[in-house]
Amino acid sequence: MAIAISSSPSAPVNPALPSLLAALGRVPDHRRTQGRRHPLSAVLGLAVVGVLAGCPHPLAICEWGRVCDPAFVAALGFDRPTPVPSTFHR
């Protein structure tokens, strides 16, 4: 499921432009494998859209992620609930 945002509802989406999640998926993940529960691209995507939604700090981003539509959260790449603030901070 791809999420496309455009300035005009009738504007075509340019398939040559990489999606946000594809670009975030290329960020190297230096976290230890042990205990890794969320894909880095999903966590970074949550941070980006949380800030765009007006969340001023990590706690607000996490709380906002918990009340988002499950389909939207799944589209970001989460297969379980979004991270709690301590996980998000780490």
Image: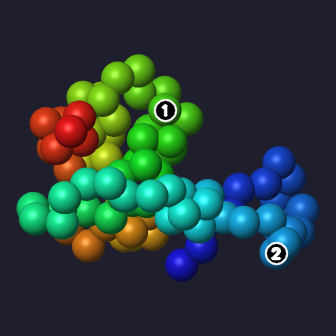
First along the sequence among labels 1 and 2: 2
- Viewer-closest of 30 and 60: 30
Q: Position of residue 12 (x, y in %)?
A: 88, 69
Spot occupied by residue 38 in the image (x, y as percentages of width and height)? 25, 62
Point 45% across, 58% down: residue: 28
- Residue 51 located left or right of residue 2: left
Q: Is residue 52 visible?
A: yes
* Residue 87 position in % (x across, y down): 16, 44
Identify the residue at image location x=33%, y=35%. 61
Q: Which residue is mark 1?
A: 51
Dividing the image into 4 quarters, which one contains the C terminus? top left
Say left or right for 80 vs 57: left
Q: How many residues crowd mark 2 within 10 Å: few (<14), some (14–19), many (20+)?
A: few
Q: Is residue 37 visible?
A: no
User: Closest to the observer: 7 or 22?
Assistant: 22
67 sits left or right of 41 in the view: left
Q: Nearer the viewer, residue 42 or 3?
A: 42
- Residue at image position (10%, 65%) is 34
Q: In this picture, is 45 found above or below 56? A: below
Q: Is residue 48 left or right of residue 33?
A: right
Residue wearing tag 2: 15
Extreme residue toward the left, this view: 35
- Which residue type does callout 2 highlight? Pro
Q: Is 82 above or below relative to 63?
A: below
Residue 23: percent from left, percent from top: 61, 60
3D distance between C-alphas at marks 1 and 2: 25 Å
Q: What secondary structure is found at the residue carrying circle 1?
A: helix
Residue found farthest to the bottom: 1
- The structure's colour scheme is rainbow
* Secondary element type, mark 2: loop
At x 41%, y 21%, the residue is: 56
Instruction: Judge whether 79 appears above or below 40 on screen.
Output: below
